[in-house]
Image (cartoon, coloured by chain):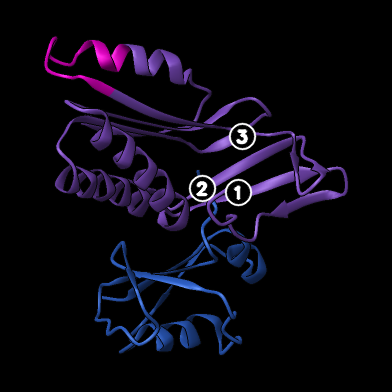
Chain colours: A purple, B blue
């Protein structure tokens, strides 16, 4: 059970590997994960770098609540949410969600639910650096 | 105890500050008016009281932390 906000680059695959090794062997039958990485374009415009701002105390609280809600809704063996803040380059991981359960449906559904809830409600804000200057991203796209 | 008011992201830049204090206010909307000297309220604004989402008519009291921010864009 973990939520983590990081201000430096991280390897989501390493996090998944290390986190899954601490789960009790033989109990977990399914793992589902989502990894969001930074693109070098948005709406056909080049994006060279990005800054992610957050509201530290509220964001930490919100991610913990989100994880608890997912665990209340589905029988998860464990759950991991990692999110970047600060300076981000194209190709860097922005968000990692991992869900582990005895059977696939709970892990898959919880993972899909968590990323949608996070995108629409967690207090993070992206500012993109484009060729014509800095721009705040106005809103997240619907279910893309 | 004063009420702490915080602004984030594009709203922080538009207002030119990240936080301020006000002596007293009974609702979130009133806190906005006092903290910004009656700046017009942006059309799409989110608010939080003591780190939980709230609404403009939510009641607040001395010592609370009120935050205003634009739609979120994480993930």
In this view, the mark in front (2 or 3): 2
What predominant SS class does the magenta segment belong to? loop
Mark 1 crowd level (few <14, some 14–19, many ≥20, 10 Å Cα): many
The CA distance from mark 1 to mark 3 is 10 Å
Task: Tell me the number on the disc at residue A126.
Answer: 1
Depth order, front residue of A87/B16:
A87
Let me know if marks 2 and 1 both belong to one chain: no
Say if mark 2 contacts mark 3, CB within 8 Å. Answer: no
Number of numbered callouts drawn: 3
Residue labelled with disc 2: B74
Say if mark 2 contacts mark 1, CB within 8 Å. Answer: yes
Letter of the chain that mark 1 sits on in the rendering? A
Name the image quarter holding residue A80.
top left
Q: In this view, does A133 lie to the left or right of B40?
A: right
Residue labelled with disc 3: A87
Residue name at image x 30 percent, y 89 percent: B26
Task: Tell me the number on the disc at residue A31.
Answer: none
Residue name at image x 56 percent, y 37 percent: A86
State which tag comes first along the sequence, 1 or 3: 3
- Please state the extent of the stretch shown in magenta in the rendering: A18-30
């Amino acid at each position: 059970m973990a939520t983590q906000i990081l201000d430096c680059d991280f390897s989501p695959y390493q996090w998944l590997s290390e986190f899954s090794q601490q789960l009790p062997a033989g109990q977990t039958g399914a793992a589902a994960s989502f990894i969001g990485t930074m693109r070098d374009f948005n709406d056909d415009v080049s994006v060279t770098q990005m800054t992610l701002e957050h509201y530290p105390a509220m964001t930490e609280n919100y991610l913990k609540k989100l994880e608890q809600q997912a665990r209340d809704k589905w029988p998860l063996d464990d759950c991991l949410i990692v999110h970047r803040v600060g300076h981000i380059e194209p190709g860097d991981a922005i968000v990692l969600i991992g869900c582990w359960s005895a059977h696939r449906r709970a892990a898959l559904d919880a993972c899909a639910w968590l990323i949608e809830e996070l995108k629409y409600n967690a207090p993070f804000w992206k500012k993109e650096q484009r060729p014509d200057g800095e721009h705040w991203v106005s809103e997240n796209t619907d279910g893309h | 105890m004063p009420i702490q008011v915080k602004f984030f992201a594009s709203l922080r830049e538009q207002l030119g500050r990240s936080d301020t204090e006000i002596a007293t206010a009974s609702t979130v909307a009133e806190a906005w008016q006092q903290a910004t000297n009656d700046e017009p309220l942006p059309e799409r604004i989110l608010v939080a009281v003591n780190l939980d989402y709230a609404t403009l008519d939510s009641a607040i009291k001395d010592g609370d932390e009120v935050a205003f921010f634009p739609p979120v864009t994480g993930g």
